[in-house]
Image: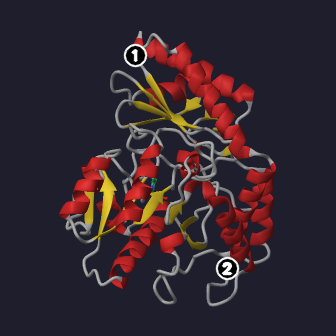
């Protein structure tokens, strides 16, 4: 152990942090599994997991050990050299993702930047000078310029024009709108959507996952790339390793991040089928792409997920939580939706204040998105006891709130 400790934060001093985040008046100093702890030892049930990130829970001993050992051995050498952990992590990820090629990025937005570049290059390879990508209303793809331009939320784009061009927007779940776009825009090369919209309100398409099958068909028909943003839905979150695996189709391009690193910042853009071989030497890169440390984290996480059947647990506990919430809140005008452990409870009125109420009165960390949707993203290895604890607290809170 080193002897550097953190002095207590002086709240009367001006902060040097750019004020871009709306923070809650609490900080956690440690975590263990599904729980977070403040300095005074108060325990909070974490049903947000760093926004769908820490799926295997906080301070997972096997991941912590892998990080410590690799940090003490070799963190980074750059991609000027072979990185054995990167090769091994790519192999493991490609296997669970059903993909062929993997490029490691450092975040979800960067993964989507990679996908957008693949789509554009795919177009240029066919002589399309101004390639276009279809994206959905209410989507969220990140905060970089290209990804915020792809995002279907004006608030995210406000103040950052001119936006990156080349995106055509359609309502989420609307196949006719895609077919219409195909007629009106000759330069379309790809479609990019989330299987379930996370930030947009845990929105599933009206036709469920068959939306993805319909998109696959259209992409085949027009020689477009089918690109899925599984930054949030990936890595076991919806009860399959990737949400598209609820269907019989496979996308050409798949992006992910969040749960891929359980808190270690790493993402990936992957390809198969038409997406393979589009990006070649010199087309893309990042100093930190697949460091030895980050890659070992990915490898370790997938290994744990496989050995401990975490994805099956997410499916089973998710179905249980949804069923219980539906039953116990049946008379309260709420809609419970989602797959696996990506669950939204839509209330009949805006309910942003429930974040504070859940935290302060029920010692539970939740999120509210789209104004009136309580979003639950608990640990994927949640136990039956923890699932019951979460249900009990939520039901009590929502009943009291709507009374
Ligand atoms: C579907 C989706 N795509 C992209 C992103 C952006 O990821 P990051 O914040 O790691 O850049 C997010 C983050 O919430 C997301 O939910």
**Nearest the eye: 140 or 22:** 140
Horizontal side, residue 326 vs residue 177: left or right: right
First in sequence: mark 2 or mark 1? 2
Is 153 located above or below residue 283 in the figure? Answer: above
Measure the C-alpha gap from mark 2 to mark 1. 53 Å
Is 280 located above or below residue 349 in the figure? Answer: below
Image quadrant of residue 5?
bottom right
Horizontal side, residue 214 vs residue 234: left or right: left
Horizontal side, residue 372 vs residue 392: left or right: left
How many callouts does the rendering have?
Answer: 2
What is the number of the mark on residue 197? none
Whole-percent x and y of residue 134?
A: 31, 60
**Nearest the eye: 359 or 211:** 211
Whole-percent x and y of residue 210?
A: 46, 44
Whole-percent x and y of residue 291?
A: 65, 75
Please identify the quadrant where the N terminus is shown. Answer: bottom right
Is 332 located above or below residue 183 in the figure? Answer: above
Horizontal side, residue 317 vs residue 258: left or right: right
Question: What element does badge 2 sit on?
Answer: loop
Residue placed under numbered mark 1 in the picture: 333
**Nearest the eye: 226 or 300:** 226
Task: Tell me if I can see residue 263 in this picture.
Answer: no
What is the number of the mark on residue 76? 2
Q: Residue at x 27, y 55 (%)?
A: 179
Q: Residue at x 25, y 61 (%)?
A: 182
């Amino acid at each position: 152990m080193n002897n550097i400790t953190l002095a207590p934060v002086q709240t009367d001093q001006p902060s040097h942090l750019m004020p871009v985040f709306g923070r809650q008046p609490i900080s956690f100093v440690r975590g263990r599994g599904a729980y977070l702890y403040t300095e005074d030892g108060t325990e909070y049930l974490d049903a947000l997991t760093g926004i769908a990130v820490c799926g295997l829970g906080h301070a997972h001993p096997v991941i912590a050990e892998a990080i410590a050992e690799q940090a003490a051995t070799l963190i980074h050498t750059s991609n000027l050299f072979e990185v054995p952990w990167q090769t091994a992590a790519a192999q493991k990820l490609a296997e669970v993702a059903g993909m062929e090629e993997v490029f490691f990025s450092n975040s979800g937005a960067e993964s989507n930047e990679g996908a957008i570049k693949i789509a554009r290059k795919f177009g240029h390879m066919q002589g399309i000078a101004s390639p276009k990508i279809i994206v959905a209303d209410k989507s969220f793809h990140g905060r970089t310029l290209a990804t915020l331009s792809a995002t279907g939320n004006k608030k995210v784009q406000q103040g950052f024009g001119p936006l990156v061009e080349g995106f055509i927007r359609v309502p989420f779940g609307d196949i006719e709108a895609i077919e219409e776009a195909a007629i009106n825009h000759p330069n379309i090369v790809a479609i990019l959507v989330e299987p379930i919209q996370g930030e947009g309100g845990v929105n599933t398409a009206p036709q469920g996952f068959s939306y993805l099958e319909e998109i696959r068909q259209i992409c085949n028909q027009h020689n477009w790339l089918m690109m899925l943003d599984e930054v949030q839905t990936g890595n076991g979150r919806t009860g399959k390793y990737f949400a598209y695996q609820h269907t019989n189709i496979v996308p050409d391009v798949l992006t992910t991040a969040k749960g891929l690193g359980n808190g270690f910042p790493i993402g990936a853009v992957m390809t198969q089928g038409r997406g393979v071989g589009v990006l070649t030497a010199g087309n893309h890169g990042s100093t930190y792409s697949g460091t030895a440390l980050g890659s070992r984290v990915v490898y370790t996480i997938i290994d744990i997920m496989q050995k401990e059947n975490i994805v099956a647990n997410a499916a089973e506990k998710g179905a249980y939580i949804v069923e219980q919430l539906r039953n116990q809140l049946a008379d309260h005008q709420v809609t419970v939706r989602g797959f696996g452990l990506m669950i939204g409870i839509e209330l009949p009125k805006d309910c942003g204040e429930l974040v504070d109420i859940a935290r302060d009165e029920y010692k539970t960390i939740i999120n509210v998105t789209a104004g009136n949707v309580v979003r639950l993203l608990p640990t994927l290895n949640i136990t039956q006891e923890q699932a019951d604890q979460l249900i009990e607290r939520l039901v009590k809170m929502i009943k009291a709130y709507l009374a």
